Amino acid sequence: MLMAVGQENYPFYWEFLNVNIDVQENGDMLVSETHKYVFTQPHTQERSRYIPLDKVDNIKDVAVFENNQKIPAKIEVENHQLWIKWQHQLNPPEAHTFVLKYRVIGGLQVSEDEARVYWKAIFSGRNAPIQNAKVVVRFPEVLSGKITEYTSYGILTQIRQINPYTFQFIGQKPVLPGQEIEVFVAFPRNLLNVSTPNFQPVSFLNSPKTDSFSDVFEDIKVVIFIIFGFIFSLLVLIMFIKWCKQVSRRPNRSRSTKSTPNRSRNTGGYSGGSQSTSSTVDSSSSANYNSSANSSSSANYNSSSSDCSSSSGYSSGGDCGGSISNVGDCGGGGGGAY
């Protein structure tokens, strides 16, 4: 079904996209992307891949291969994005497999005690689906058994720990245009020679342990203002109630008038149902609220995805970085390909 959609709306699709990320001891990431394009209709002979540069210090050593042979590629920066463009012969229907390799410098997110691979390995900027997606993140052996957390965001993935320093993320369904897989792996910073990236502010990912005195004082002032406001409102209400009682107790000084005989036997007030009002409250509006309605998104999460004690499981999916405090936007990488 998805393959038919890809053929109908775009002249090719990805049979698979495999991404390997090798983290070096200095914090660089050697990335290898293997793209298998399946062309079903005539199309341009130029392929392209772009990577945003806002979450990295630099990307270098870019190369494109086909059939284990390096082919010419044009590398340029446009709108703070690195563009990789190359050409090839095309006679559809046929398939082509290209391997893109590059080095990411300053791509880890670093805090005082922790460093993190936070990378959109399977990018969303596409017009065609990816039938099969896999991401492998490999660390130096010095981090064997030292990984503190690993998960992924985006579409549902199966996560498996291949060995104490290698982790695999496999998409459980085709990755449609606009969807992505973002991997997240955290480890102690002091085990590698990792420096803080230039793009990252000094306070980025560093949560203050205690609030400053000025912040605490501001919070206290807000609380005091709320308390005094409540007390003032309560006093005004009490005074109003007392005034109403005093008014109701004042004697009626108007001249008394002769009572007229009641010419009607019905002295019970208004007769008939047209003047009465119903005390029944329509609860249909409140029936629209259901405490479980807002939890549909959380139903896609599986606690095993972030449980580092297990070697396999399924990722939470959903938005990126939802469980990480003070991270801000999603990680680096991403972009697209055509």
Image (cartoon, rainbow, N blue to C red):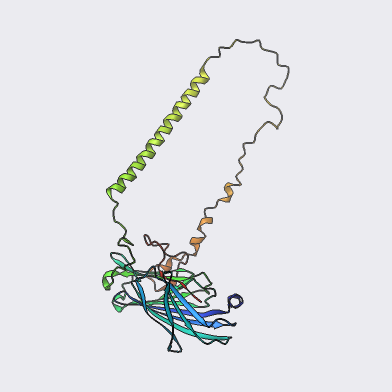
Please state which of residues 123 and 338 is positioned toward the viewer in this rendering: 338
Vertical placement of residue 324 versus 269, above or below = below
Q: Where is residue 244 drawn, in percent x and y?
A: 50, 24
Observer able to see residue 275: yes
Please state which of residues 70 and 146 is positioned toward the viewer in this rendering: 70
For image coordinates 43% across by 33% down, the residue present is 233
Query: Residue 120 vs residue 269: left or right?
Result: left
Vertical placement of residue 329 versus 215, above or below = below
Q: Where is residue 320 drawn, in percent x and y?
A: 44, 65
Query: Residue 203 vs residue 260: left or right?
Result: left
Vertical placement of residue 170 versus 263, above or below = below
The quarter of the picture where residue 71 lies is bottom left
The quarter of the picture where residue 13 lies is bottom right
For image coordinates 42% across by 30% down, the residue present is 235
State which quarter of the image contains the N terminus. bottom right
Q: Where is residue 309 drawn, in percent x and y?
A: 37, 70
Number of marks present in the image shown: 0
The quarter of the picture where residue 206 lies is bottom left
Observer able to see residue 164: no
Vertical placement of residue 15 versus 185, above or below = below
Q: Where is residue 19 drawn, in percent x and y?
A: 43, 78
For image coordinates 26% across by 70% down, the residue present is 190
